[in-house]
Image (spheres, rainbow, N blue to C red):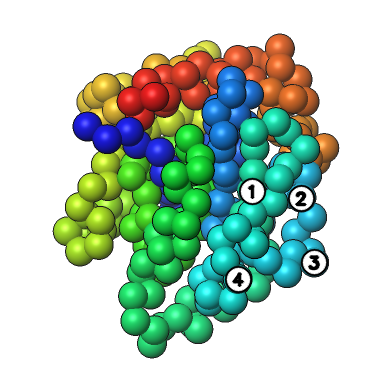
Amino acid sequence: MAKIKTIVFANQKGGVGKTTSAVNIAASLAAVGNKVVLVDSDPQGNATSGLGIKKRGNTNSVYDLFIRRVSTREALQKTRFDNLYVIPSGMDLVGAEIELVDEERREYRLKDALAEIKDEFDYIIIDSPPSLGLITINALTAADGVIVPLLCEYYSLEGLSQLTQTVKQIQKRYNPDLSLLGVLINMYDGRLNLTLQVMSEIKKYFGDKLFKVPVPRNVRLSEAPSYGEPICVYDKRSKGAIAYEGIAAELAERCGG
């Protein structure tokens, strides 16, 4: 089986730790020597700022890739962290869905762009917006595998079936090689009965797709983005950093790396 290297973090529900997971897993993979690019395809641009890149003034962004204004190499930016690159985002990406509505192969814009650099990186991590629109469809079409971040709350389970159906539709129409790489639990608190109940439900439906290490509630994880640093740099001894290190190692195994 070919190694999985392009991974999208997707969940149409916001506030589930999707961007936090994308940033910190990308950084954890880079920290052990992998060459990694994080593609910020969320108009909020939080993954961009979370790596210390300013959201404003980026003339070469993922939006420019979607409308084919620049090449992928022109959009690449080196972060100040070893082995870690970013293709930044910003609010102009909001207009891409409208601009592309009548374009041919509009679902393949990101896949076509990333083909230019795919062989140059060990991993391409895509952070997608909290919706199931054209940008997310592009991200799923471009990816080899999808990771679904969830909270240990029943509300976070709502819509999971819709996302699963969307993945099946993407497999059928645009990307037959897309696989569900895993389900990742964020803000885990084992002291709460609700947490244990929801974990039991997730295990029932997803079995070994559930990552072994959940990400605990951790203040240091919440602080790190304001400093423009991933948790493995901001506080590598924190519980959050240790959790993401373990998840990145398990992910590398699942990807065949």
| Mark 4 or mark 2, whichever is nearer to me | 4
Q: Is residue 98 left or right of residue 69?
A: left
Q: Which label belongs to residue 86? A: 1
User: Distance between the Cα atoms at labels 1 and 4?
Assistant: 15 Å
Query: Mark 2 and mark 3: span between their CA atoms?
Result: 10 Å
Identified by mark 1, the residue type is Val
Q: Which residue is mark 2?
A: 53
For residue 128, say whether it is visible: yes
Local crowd at mark 4 within 10 Å, few (<14), some, or many (≥20)?
some
Rendered position, 20 above or below 216: below
> Residue furthest toward the bottom?
102
| Marks 1 and 4, the one that precedes in the sequence | 4
Element at label 1: strand
Mark 1 or mark 3, earlier in chain: 3
* 1 vs 4, front mark: 4
Q: Are marks 2 and 3 in contact (CB under 8 Å)?
A: no
User: The disc labelled 2 sits on which kind of residue?
Assistant: Ile
> Of the numbered discs in the image, which one, if any, rests on residue 57?
3
Query: In whole angstroms, how far apart are the C-alphas of marks 4 and 3?
Result: 15 Å
Q: CA distance from mark 1 to mark 3?
A: 15 Å
Q: Secondary structure at mark 4?
A: loop
Across and down, in percent, residue 33 comes to 59, 23
> Do the residues bearing badges 1 and 2 touch, measured as CB atoms within 8 Å?
yes
CB within 8 Å, label 1 to label 3: no
Give the residue drawn at x 29%, y 28%.
209
Amino acid at dot 3: Gly
Q: Is residue 15 above or below residue 112?
A: above
Could you say where residue 31 lies in the image, as x and y percent from the top left? 63, 24
Instruction: Say which quadrant the N terminus sits in.
Output: top left
